[in-house]
Image (cartoon, rainbow, N blue to C red):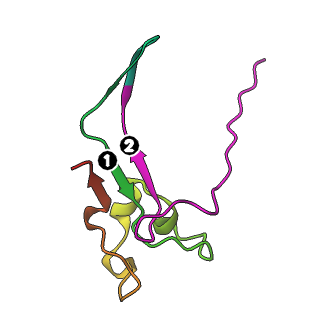
Amino acid sequence: MKTKFVIQKYNENPLLVLGRKFDIRVWVLVTDWNPLIVWMYKDPYIRFAANDFDLNDIENKYSHLSNNTVSAECEEDEKPTGSTSHDIPENMWTLS
């Protein structure tokens, strides 16, 4: 019997943009190794968490996950407000 494992570690010190966790979605196709030829899809994007990152609130999925479905679930009263919050419209940035 073959056994498969998924091993992961939570990054406690992630890179942040305007206080938010993010992931970068970019698609590439490598058609040759020598010489290296790489094609990149022209519309990559960055997805942001709905809330500012806070390691002290590990249960807040809106500050730790940048998934669009999770961010869309975040109610307006759960979104950060005030001078310390950052406004990232639509939780996504395109390359442009």
Q: Position of residue 71 (x, y in %)?
A: 37, 62
Query: Residue lying farthest left?
Result: 96
Residue corresponding to mark 1: 45
Q: Quadrant of residue 86?
A: bottom left
Query: Residue lying farthest front?
Result: 35
What is the secondary structure assignment of the residue under circle 2?
Answer: strand
Tell me if residue 39 is in the magenta stretch: no
- The residue shown at (28%, 55%) is 93
Which residues, given as a range, are shown in magenta? Answer: 1-28
Q: Position of residue 75 (x, y in %)?
A: 34, 74
Residue corresponding to mark 2: 25
Q: Judge from the rendering whether residue 10 lies leftward or rightward of residue 30; answer left or right.
A: right
Is label 1 in contact with label 2 (beta carbons under 8 Å)? Answer: yes
Q: Amino acid at mark 2?
A: Arg
Decide: few, some or many residues near mark 1? Use Cα within 10 Å; few <14, some 14-19, many ≥20: some
86 or 67: nearer the viewer: 86
Q: Judge from the rendering whether residue 88 lies leftward or rightward of residue 32; answer left or right.
A: left
Query: Residue lying farthest right?
Result: 1
Q: Judge from the rendering whether residue 12 lies leftward or rightward of residue 72; answer left or right.
A: right
- The residue shown at (31%, 77%) is 76
Q: Quadrant of residue 30?
A: top left
51 or 28: nearer the viewer: 28
Quarter of the figure that contains the N terminus: top right
- The residue shown at (52%, 60%) is 15
Q: Position of residue 36 (x, y in %)?
A: 43, 17
